[in-house]
Amino acid sequence: MPGTPANDALPRQSRLRDKPQQRRARQRLDAILNAAEMLVEDMEAEAITTNMIADRAGVPVSSVYRYFKNVSAVFAYLFEDLNEEIIAVIEECLAKSQPGWDDWREVTGMIIMRLHLFLMENPGYWKLLLVMQTSHELREAKSVMISQVADMLSARWRDGLDGFAGGDPDLVARFTVEIFMSIETRCAQIRDPKLLSEMFAELVKALEAYLSLYLNKVPPADAGSETAG
C-alpha cells in the first residue's frame, strides 16, 4: 500500500512521469498516493480531482502533475498496488498446495476466501472497479492483472499439477480469471456484507463446476492401486 518508498523494479513505476530519487520527493509521492486512497474510500471516485488530491496531501497541485498526467493515472497506480497484493495472496495459496486428488478444490476455496477478506479490508478497490469503464489506464491495469494471474495458473497446469487434462491450459486459465473478475465487478456494486458473502460462496461453486471439467478428472494411478488393495 502507499507509504512505502517507490520501488523502481515494480511494473507500476512505469506510470510515473517522474521517478522520485530523493527521500523528500519519495515522501511527497507517498503523501499524494495516501491522499488519493483516502479520498477514494471517502467519496465517489468520479468526483475526485487533482486539486482535491493536492489539498488532502498538503502539496501544490503541480506536484501531482509532476508524477501523474491525470487522476486516472493516480487511480491506475493505486489499482496496480492493490493488484500486486492480490497476486501475492494467490501465489501464497498456490505455494501451500500439494498435488493430490481434489486438492484443487481446497486451493480454489482458499484463494477466494483470502481474496474476499482482502477486498473487504480494501473498500477503495471496489470504487476503482466501478470507474473502470471510463478510465483507459484502469482498464489497462486490469488487463495486465488478468494476464499475470492466468499465466500463473496455466504454468501450474502445464507442469501437470491438479491433474489438468482435456483442454488448453492457457484458455482455461484465462476463462477462470475472467469468471472471477466478472463476479468481482458485480460485487463492487453491492453494499450488503451478507449478500457479498453469498456472492463469493456462489463464485466458489461456479469455479469448481467449470474447473472440474479439466482438473483431476480421474484419480491418480497410485490412488487406484490403494483402493484396489
Image (cartoon, rainbow, N blue to C red):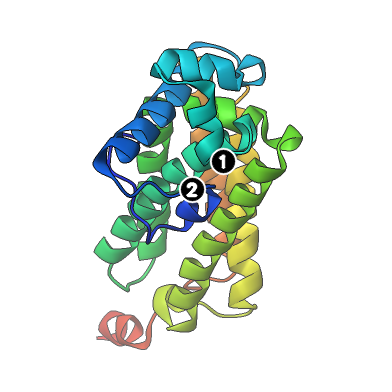
Q: 4 and 181: which one is in front? A: 4
How many labels sit on residues? 2
Q: Residue at x 35, y 41 (%)?
A: 114
Q: Which residue is mark 2?
A: 18
Q: Residue at x 58, y 62 (%)?
A: 147
Residue 76: which disc?
Answer: 1
Residue lying at 42% horizontally and 28% vertically, measured from the top left: 32
Locate residue 165, reporting x and y percent.
56, 80
Q: Is residue 167 left or right of residue 40?
A: right
Is 131 positioned to the left or the right of 220 in the image? right
Quadrant of the rendered image containing residue 121: top left
Nearer the observer: mark 1 or 2; the answer is: 2
Quadrant in which the N terminus is drawn = top left
CA gap, disc 1 and disc 2: 16 Å
x%, y% of residue 221?
37, 88
Label 2 environment density (alpha carbons within 10 Å; few <14, some 14–19, many ≥20): few
Camera sees residue 82: yes
Q: Which amino acid type is marked by label 1?
A: Ala
> Is 100 placed above or below 129 here?
below
Q: Quadrant of the C terminus?
A: bottom left
The spot of residue 124 in percent (x, y) is 48, 26
Q: For this rendering, which residue is in front, 124 or 214?
A: 124
211 w.r.t. 31: above or below: below
Q: Position of residue 81 (x, y in %)?
A: 43, 44
Residue at 65% in and 28% down: 130
Q: Identify the element where label 2 is drawn.
A: loop
